[in-house]
Image: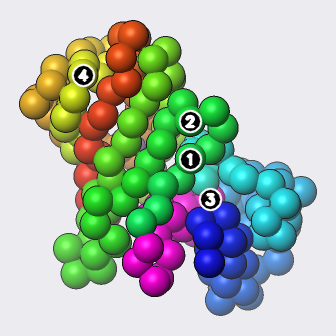
Amino acid sequence: MNIAQHLALTLKTLRQQRGWSLSRLADETGVSKAMLGQIERNESSPTVATLWKIATGLNVPFSLFITPANGDETAFDPQQQAMVIKPVFPWDPALRVDHFAITLAPGALSESTPHEVGVIERVVAISGTLEMCIDGEWQSVNEGEGRQFAADRAHAYRNSSPQTVLFHSLIYYP
Ligand code: MN
């Protein structure tokens, strides 16, 4: 099963487990019913921002959608590879943490909608200088440095450099 098929099946399964219609899912996630239907039928691939809205509305970890159960290496690679997200570890239900390696292409900007209430995020710049907007202020995160912040509010990631930036994002669910 490839990542797109896995994502489509996971969404449909999670929705049906809750006994929700597509309309209810649209209400809970803020993503249109038409778009959700297309994703479930694997006719459309969501952006990172859309997938975050879906994960948040369903109250499940983001990595569920991008980590096939067979453990094959995966990369969620929407649209022009501006931002590629790979799980470093699969979702750990005991630790309640997701751990991603994320690459941002030169010039890439990713705005994150707030995660669930109480979610804490850590980012660590592995290669290159990452720029982050936390509480409305842009700041540089230099290679080897980290930031920790409450992720239940809007935040954003940006790469203003001419080189690809690699960073790790660890998402702690309460
Ligand atoms: Mn985030």
**Could you give the CA–CA distance between mark 1 and mark 4, rounded to whole angstroms?**
20 Å
Q: Name which quarter of the figure residue 95 lies in.
A: bottom left
Disc 3 CB within 8 Å of nearest ligand 1 atom:
no
- Mark 1, secondary structure of its residue: loop
Relative placement, left or right, of 16 versus 75 is right
- Which residue appears at 32% of the width and 48% of the height? 101
Disc 4 CB within 8 Å of nearest ligand 1 atom:
no
Q: Does the magenta stretch include residue 62?
A: yes
**Could you give the CA–CA distance between mark 1 and mark 2, rounded to whole angstroms?**
6 Å
**Could you give the CA–CA distance between mark 4 and mark 3, rounded to whole angstroms?**
30 Å
Q: Name which quarter of the figure residue 29 lies in.
A: bottom right
According to the image, label 3 marks what residue? 54
**Could you give the CA–CA distance between mark 2 and mark 3, rounded to whole angstroms?**
20 Å
Residue 20: % across, % down: 75, 80
Query: What range is drawn magenta here?
Result: 52-72
Q: Nearer the viewer, residue 38 or 32?
A: 38
- Residue at the right extreme of this rendering: 34
Q: Which of marks 4 and 3 is in front?
A: 4
**What mark, if any, has residue 77 been given in the picture?**
1
Which residue type does callout 4 highlight? Gly
Q: Which of marks 2 and 3 is nearer the N terminus?
A: 3
Label 2 Cα neighbours within 10 Å, binned few <14 / some 14-19 / many ≥20 = few
Q: Label 2 near label 1: C-beta < 8 Å?
A: yes
Residue 51: % across, % down: 60, 53
Q: Quadrant of ligand 1?
A: top left
Decide if residue 102 is in sight here.
yes
Q: Where 109 sits versus 59, above or below?
A: above
